[in-house]
Amino acid sequence: MSSDADTSLLTIDHLTVARGGRTVLHDLDAGVRPGELYGVIGANGSGKSTLVQAVAGLLPREAGDIRYRGRSIRAAHRRALAREIAYLPQNPVCHWPLTVERLVTLGRIPHVGPWARPGEDDIQAVREAMAAVDVEHLASRQVNRLSGGEQRRVLLARALAGEPRLLLADEPTSGLDPYHQLQLLEFLVRRIVHGVSVILVLHNLTLASRFCDRLLLLRDGGALAEGDSAEVLAPDNLARAYGVEARRFSSDGQTAVVPWKRL
Amino acid sequence: MSRRTENCLVFGGLGLLTALIALLSICVGTVFLSPARALELLFAGEDELLGVAVRELRLPRTASALLVGGTLGLAGAVLQGYTRNPLADSGLLGVNGGAALGAVLMLYTGTFAHVSLALPLGGLAGALAATLLIVALTGKAGIASLILAGVAVSSLAAALTSLVLNFSPNPYAGMEIVHWLLGSVADRSWDHVGLVLPFMTAGVFILFLTGPGLRALSLGEDTASSLGFSLRRLRWFVILGTALAVGPATALAGAIGFVGLVVPHLLRPLLRHDPARLLAASALGGAALLTGADLLIQLLPADREFKLGVMTALVGAPFFFYLIFKIRKEYP
């Protein structure tokens, strides 16, 4: 069991997950505290996406447990859990050319119920979610006609519209230019202020060190390191997890970690 | 425009259109009736001979067209929503193929000559067999394998239907089979309608239950699941609902294509691409389209009546061309 089981929002306890006959996560322990931006990093295939999918309840577990606020998510009611935890997949899509407002409203489904119409609360929550990621002005546009950065923000607004306590975001910055990467992470940090906890899968070590409160470094489905960003991003760890040498650059008292060359 | 007025306009318009076409189709026949006279005859007493003819001959035909069209439109919308592919329709699951094979076997063996309900019963049995085969083939796997299983079962059913034709005892039996396969709602009686109605009602009810799940599925399978939907239950509803609704529809009217493909397509923009509201609209639209096609057939001067399936295919195939041009423009 994780040492900080009492204070943690989410406890991952000896978790083992297999996909297609291959064990992807093996005996993993980790814990997410309330109100933190928790980064999950690691090489391709190290199990980052599998971890967030397991937390979202999308994958069966072989062994171990995932506890949200002390209760196993296996025991939780599906809809009740959907109201608490929102999941933004790695390549979020919208298959039909819905308007932005209607797409964001889909995030209210766990609150509205399948047959009811969205009420005042729901409309308010949708507006707030759109405002939080600055897409209000796009409300009546068709989502397929937006730029990549706008689409990402709209899909993030969809996830925020459910007013989750925990947001799982799988590489939300992939494919975005530096401006929009920074913008998206700033939106996430602002959500933290509003009491939302975020589990964020990232490839960019510089962004991870700059924005995340704590990091989990995965290697071959296990935790290589978990803790404060500076400790986790130690050269040793990065060499073992990625096989790269990283350099540190300081400016105004802040340190950036940049992968420099292959080992 | 508010969502409520928009709904009123779309559903009110479609309902009115369907009712109008249904009324016209009762007026048309060997003797033409004015709409007022047709309505009067519908509620006339037993002693009015024309009234009996309208109620026992024309009304079942109209009811069959409405039921079959509505079912095909609805099932098409469900399958397009489920696969998130605008080119899907109920034929994708192979249930129609199974139903056609069952009915054709009845024609082949000549059973229909002795039992008037043999054809629809055979169709129901065929649809059931096709469904069981699809379920066995798919197991617990996802959408892609369901489509593959559907294609496989369709091909098998088509091959076996050809085999039956190949061995048809005489040219007349062969002609009979081909004619039935072309699809029609002519000369259907209330017995036919009554036989398939319970199954269709159950199927249509189940298909309507898929609406909220289909709406969530706009965001992909993982997100829909994270919003609290059980994808497994949704898949069962799609398979079971399609089998119960479309199998009997094929048993009643033969193989009728394109309605399930075209109707959801035409109506989707009116409902702002919402897969859930599209279901009821497609049911109404399908009913209107097929009843309209049947009305057109009855109005066309011909020694030999146009078959309904031929009419829908003649309209549907050019629509396919149009779709290709549209898709070419959107994704150059």
Image (cartoon, helix red, strand yellow):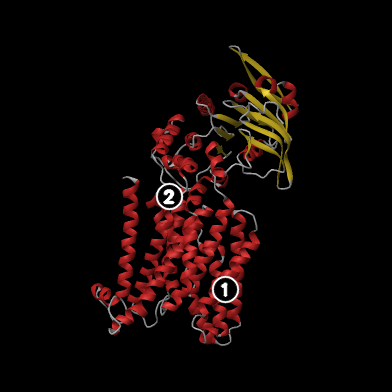
Q: Is residue B186 visible?
A: yes
Q: Which residue is mark 2?
A: B273
Residue B212 x, y percent position in the rendering: 48, 50
Under circle 2, the secondary element is loop
Under circle 1, the secondary element is helix
- Name the amino acid, label 2: His
Give the mark toward the camera: 2 or 1: 1
When the figure is inspected, residue A66 is found, relative to residue B300, above or below; the finding is above
When the figure is inspected, residue A151 is found, relative to residue B230, above or below; the finding is above
Residue B50 quadrant? bottom left
Mark 2 / mark 1, whichever is N-terminal: 1
Q: Which residue is mark 1?
A: B125
Q: Residue at x 60, y 31 (%)?
A: A199
Q: Residue at x 65, y 63 (%)?
A: B136
Label 1 neighbourhood size at 10 Å, few (<14), some (14-19), many (20+)? many
Is the residue under label 1 in contact with that under label 2 (CB below 8 Å)? no
Q: Is residue A171 left or right of residue B76?
A: right
When the figure is inspected, residue A223 is found, relative to residue B32, above or below; the finding is above
Residue A81 quadrant? top right
Comparing A5 with B167, the one in front is: A5
